[in-house]
Image (cartoon, rainbow, N blue to C red):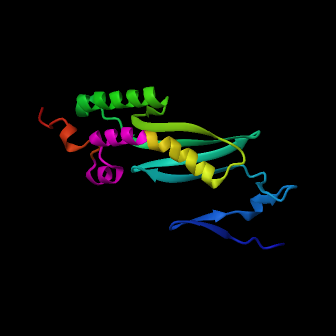
Amino acid sequence: MQERRQFTLIIGDRRLPLDIHALALDEHGDMVGVDRRSFSFRFTYRQVPIAARFADHDGVAAIELEGDVGPMPFSAESSLARNELQTVLDAANTHLGEVFGVVDGRIVLTHSIGLSNPVTAVGLVTAIAGFLVPIKPYLDTIGVFLLPPGEAAKTGEALRPGWRRPKNF
C-alpha cells in the first residue's frame, strides 16, 4: 500500500493540513478538486467564535457561517440592556438581512454565502471578509453591553457592570 504524505498549508503562523490527493489536473492542465467537496473550520472574529462549513452540492458552492455572540440578558438582569440589544439586532437584520437571532437565550449570527466555482482560497476568504466587515459596527455595539467571552468566563457575568441591575433593587 502506498504511503500517504502529509502536506501543510501555512498562512501566517497557522498550519493547515493540505490534502493533495483531493486535487487533480483537468484536460487543460488546470488544477481542479475531486470528490471531496465539503470541509469545515473555525475562527474568531471580534472575539466571536465562528464555525464555517463549506459544501458543494450539484455544482452550487456555499459556506455556512454560525457564530455565538453571547447571551441575551434576561429582563430580570437588565431590561434596558435586553431592549437595547434587541434594537441593535433588529437594526442589523434590517440593514444586512436576517443575520442575528436569539436561540436558546444566546445571540447567534448565521449566514450562508454563495461562492462561484471553482472555489479558491482567495475567493473564500474574500467572500467571508465581505460578510464580516459590514457586521463589525454591530458587534462593536453589542460589545457595549456584553463582556468579551474570556472576561465573562472569568467573572461569571455576561453584562458589563454599567448595565447590570443593582443586586439590592
Q: Give above or below for 130 relative to 77.
A: below
Image position, residue 49 (x, y; %):
45, 49
The quadrant of the picture occupied by the C terminus is: top left
Q: Please state if 91 lies on the left or on the right of 113 as rendered.
A: left
Total labels drawn: 0
The quadrant of the picture occupied by the N terminus is: bottom right
Q: Give above or below for 114 relative to 26.
A: above
- Judge whether residue 138 is colored magenta: yes
Segment tinted magenta in the rendering:
135-156
Kindly identify the residue that appears in the image at 57 percent across and 51 percent down: 125
Kindly identify the residue that appears in the image at 80 percent across and 59 percent down: 24
Kindly identify the residue that appears in the image at 31 percent across and 43 percent down: 143
Image position, residue 37 (x, y; %):
72, 49
- Judge whether residue 157 is colored magenta: no
Q: Quadrant of residue 2?
A: bottom right
Q: Please state if 118 lies on the left or on the right of 48 as rendered.
A: right
Q: Please state if 5 lies on the left or on the right of 50 as rendered.
A: right
Question: Looking at this view, is 12 or 81 the one in front?
Answer: 12
Q: In the displayed image of the protein, which residue is found farthest to the right?
A: 27
Image position, residue 150 (x, y; %):
34, 54
Kindly identify the residue that appears in the image at 77 percent across and 63 percent down: 21
Question: Looking at this view, is 38 or 141 the one in front?
Answer: 141
What kind of secondary structure does the magenta stretch mostly adopt? helix
Q: In the displayed image of the protein, which residue is found farthest to the left?
A: 168
Image position, residue 110 (x, y; %):
51, 37
Question: Looking at this view, is 32 or 166 the one in front?
Answer: 32
Q: Please state if 47 lies on the left or on the right of 11 as rendered.
A: left
